Amino acid sequence: MRAAAAGRPAPLLFLGLLLAGATILAAQTGAPPTAAASKSLSLDEALAAGLAGDPGLRSGSFDLASARAKSLDALFRMLPSVTVSAGYSALSQSSSSGFGTLLGDLIKEDGILAQGNPPALAQLATIGNDLAAFANPPGDSKDLRLDLSWPVFAGFRVKEAADIARLAALGKEAGLELMKRALKFDISRAYWEATRARANVEALSKSLELEAVARTELKSMADQGMATAADLLNEQARYDTTALTLDEARAGQALADLMLASLTGDASAAKPGEAPSYDLVTKAGSRPYADPGSDLTSLVAKALAARPETRAASLAVETLGSAMKAASADLYPALLLTGGLSYSDPDPRAFPPVAGFALNWSAGARLRLDLGGLPGAVERRAAASADLAKAGADLEKARNGIALDVRRSLLVLGRTRNSLELTRGMVAQAVENLRVTQAKFDNGVAKRSDLLQARIGLLRAQFAVENKTIDVEIAQADLSRALALDPAP
């Protein structure tokens, strides 16, 4: 136990100082931290609470919903634009354009008369009609319109924009899954670390009790001349070391509980002066684990197919491929079909204006090529091509990282399992040592302090087994994360 604590003195001492500082600060403010009533919490409950209440996941869900709506919006932009409108305009009783028409008629009549042409009578009739229209113009204008605009070919702009928006939504989905899997592992690890902290405090408390008994026994022996002052000092040092380690372990338990409360969305984590406390009912080694096997090639292949990082990197390659096509849009002409249908009173295309509704239509096509934008389009295509090559390299990097992650997780799990088996052998040795020491004590060959130390050794070996079992639980959770074999949360 002391060796394990000595392996990481700085972090434990730091945690102890943090807890001591928090206690002093709370005392100065008159609000000492109090431990909340212990809440029963299983690992499944912790995972469900954390995944349901995490604000980061809620933010990612809304982001995904927005991306999906934008994808549909971009897709609908490929449909023809059909606009329906209605209008009403109040018209004056005369207009300068009508007066200009009459003036033109008179000039034309003067020319006809100057030439002595017989059509002068017909021109006079025209002047009479235009004058009647000028004197009695139609009433106010009313119209109904139906306009059509359809980019049949827009240089890949519309199509690729729809593809990019769709791929962006899929990327958001992969990112949200990645966040969920990462949070699930973090909660599992925090749960087992809190379990480890409790086991450590419990083992150290029992060890301190035994050290106190041993110290009392040794003092009695020293008074009788059966133990030296050096023996007594050594036992006192062991007691003090155990007491200090217990204080550090309690600080570590408080911090582990706080971390677990924060990840599971427990409100007590944010309340000043209240320390969260849990009764962790899921015990290490009690849950069945479906071993995926040790075929590295098969496991790497499954991880590459299932991990959201691979999908996200592949989607980035597809997105930049569409972006490269969109960047080439100005290299191609755009074809736009237009059309319109109007039902108006008066007829805007008739002169003189005629009162009453009339139906008119129009249809056309326009071909456009931006010659001035061609040099820029060439450079944009070159930049998009470089981005696409970079995305391909990033995909390869992601695949290599996933393969390395799987290998590392397998090695860690194998090492922790081997360490657990060796530690279990230490328990058997400690049990045998206690049996032998008990027999010697019964026969008067061993001292009571020897028997107490044998019991402390067994206690430490049993804690070491639980500690290694927790390591195995964390390693199994890490391998499940690396393989992404579980259904997406």
Image (spheres, helix red, strand yellow):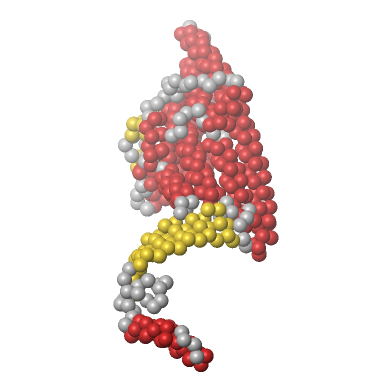
- Residue drawn at x 46%, y 33% as measured from the top left: 488
Please determine whether, in this image, residue 202 is positioned above or below residue 72: above
x and y percent of residue 152 in the render? Answer: 53, 53
The quarter in which the C terminus is drawn is top left
Question: Which of the pair 252/220 is nearer the observer?
Answer: 252
Please determine whether, in this image, residue 253 is positioned above or below residue 294: below
Image quadrant of residue 366? bottom right
- Residue drawn at x 35%, y 49% as measured from the top left: 31
- Residue drawn at x 37%, y 27% as measured from the top left: 281
x and y percent of residue 222 in the render? Answer: 50, 22
State left or right for residue 426 relative to residue 270.
right
x and y percent of residue 460 in the render? Answer: 50, 22
Number of numbered discs present? 0
Question: Which of the pair 371/63 is nearer the observer?
Answer: 371
Question: Which of the pair 124/155 is nearer the observer?
Answer: 124
Residue 463 in sight: no
State left or right for residue 138 relative to residue 111.
left
Image quadrant of residue 404? top right
- Farthest residue in the bottom direction? 114
Residue 370 in sight: yes
State left or right for residue 264 relative to residue 8.
left
x and y percent of residue 155 in the render? Answer: 59, 54
Please determine whether, in this image, residue 357 is positioned above or below residue 261: below
- Residue drawn at x 57%, y 17% as measured from the top left: 422
